Amino acid sequence: MSARRKLYIRPVGRLPADHGGLPALRVGGKSGPEFLAAELIERDGGSVRRRALEGAAIRGGTPPEGTEVLLRRLSAPRSAVAGLDLGRTRLMGVVNVTPDSFSDGGRYLGAEAAVAHALQLEAEGADILDIGGESTRPGSDPVDLEEECRRVLPVIAALAKRSKARISVDTRKAEVMRRAAAEGAHIINDVSALDHDPKALEVVALLGLPVVLMHAQGEPRTMQVAPRYDDVVLDVYDALEARIEACERAGIPRARLIVDPGIGFGKNLAHNLALLGSLSILHGLGCPILLGASRKSFIGRLTGAGAGERLPGSLAAALLGVAQGVHILRVHDVAATRQALAVWEGAG
Ligand code: 9MG
């Protein structure tokens, strides 16, 4: 095989749990989702070729040459995240402690209000509360370390005492990660995939916490200026794979990593829609998948809906994720997403 030739497998056609024994491709161990078939994608330099693989052929027959490692990763069981079993879809509720955040815009500024909002999201069914003090929305400016700590640490400390949900800290800074863990955070959520702060890999390796590696092209200030990819789905996959390898070299095992395509981070509308349509390809990385599409501007671009009117589009995106076996949904509207999930799971 030439060094440039690379294979990818995109599972397609998620089956309901009681499908009556169809020959299926199972992803992520015994409790993982099953798919009817897959697309085998071969990229060789600038050319991309695709062919269909039936579930039966993958499961029973000889795997296509060069897919052994990929198939092993696809089928390996996924570890629990901070004690949360991933046999059912988990919800991460968004708690912005920023004055400029695109959706909550200052409403929850102040530790007390943020804690109250987080507890409300937990009561609505959030399994994870994601606490962030630096807006990374397109065009936003960075926040300094002490200001970010002033915003998030009191909230994390209070929730560690008052909530049963897992707490994630949304930050790109190693020192915030370290202090947040000391206050009781269980998960690190880094929109730069531990690539922003040179100390982040080392700190996360020492902390021993699970970490969300989100894909972004560029910095928040300028990332939407002219994002470009050869093939957005394959490029995002390759970039996440490179960050997984960097983590493993730094002593963070794959079993502690969660991958995320980073909807809206250095992507135009076509890029975001292509990623949403091909999320299941990320199962080949051997990690749980997190999707954050809630209230994002691609929904506005597609439909004209303003920031406060994007719940229907957010629910559609969440269910697109579930249909492809996404494990964690990062959402603002926890109660509404729980209801959508209940209908999905009830029928499947
Ligand atoms: C902080 N943040 C904003 N959007 C996000 C997304 O899509 N994923 C993750 N992991 N974090 C996000």
Image: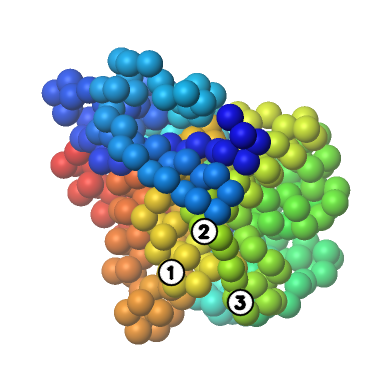
Can you give x and y, in whole percent of width and height, for residue 211 in the image?
64, 42
Residue of label 3: 226
Q: In 3D space, how far apart are the residues under numbered discs 2 and 3 (Cα atoms)?
A: 13 Å
SS at mark 1? helix
Quadrant into which the N terminus falls: top right
Please, is residue 15 above or below residue 278 in the view? above
Could you classify mark 2 by the number of other residues whose Cα lies within 10 Å: few (under 14), some (14-19), or many (20 or more)? some
Q: Which label's residue is closer to the chain start, 1 or 3?
A: 3
In this orientation, which residue lies closer to the viewer: 247 or 295? 247
SS at mark 2? helix
Identify the amino acid type marked 3.
Ala
In this orientation, which residue lies closer to the viewer: 175 or 107? 175
Asked if one can make out residue 285 in the rendered structure from this viewpoint, the answer is yes
SS at mark 3? loop
Q: Which label's residue is closer to the chain start, 2 or 3?
A: 3
Q: Mark 1 touching mark 2, by CB under 8 A?
A: yes
Identify the amino acid type marked 2.
Val
Q: Which label's residue is closer to the chain start, 1 or 2?
A: 2
Quadrant into which the C terminus falls: top left
In this orientation, which residue lies closer to the viewer: 280 or 199? 280
Could you classify mark 3 by the number of other residues whose Cα lies within 10 Å: few (under 14), some (14-19), or many (20 or more)? few
Q: How is the image coloured?
A: rainbow
Can you give x and y, in whole percent of width and height, for residue 261 in the image?
53, 54
Residue of label 2: 232
Q: In 3D space, how far apart are the residues under numbered discs 1 and 2 (Cα atoms)?
A: 9 Å
Identify the amino acid type marked 1.
Ala
Q: Tell me the residue at 32%/79% (across/down).
A: 303
Q: Tell me the residue at 31%/53% (across/down).
A: 319
Tell which quarter ligand 1 is in: bottom right
Q: Residue 270 carries which label?
A: 1
Q: Tell me the residue at 23%/47% (across/down).
A: 344
Can you give x and y, in whole percent of width and height, for residue 218 in the image?
69, 67
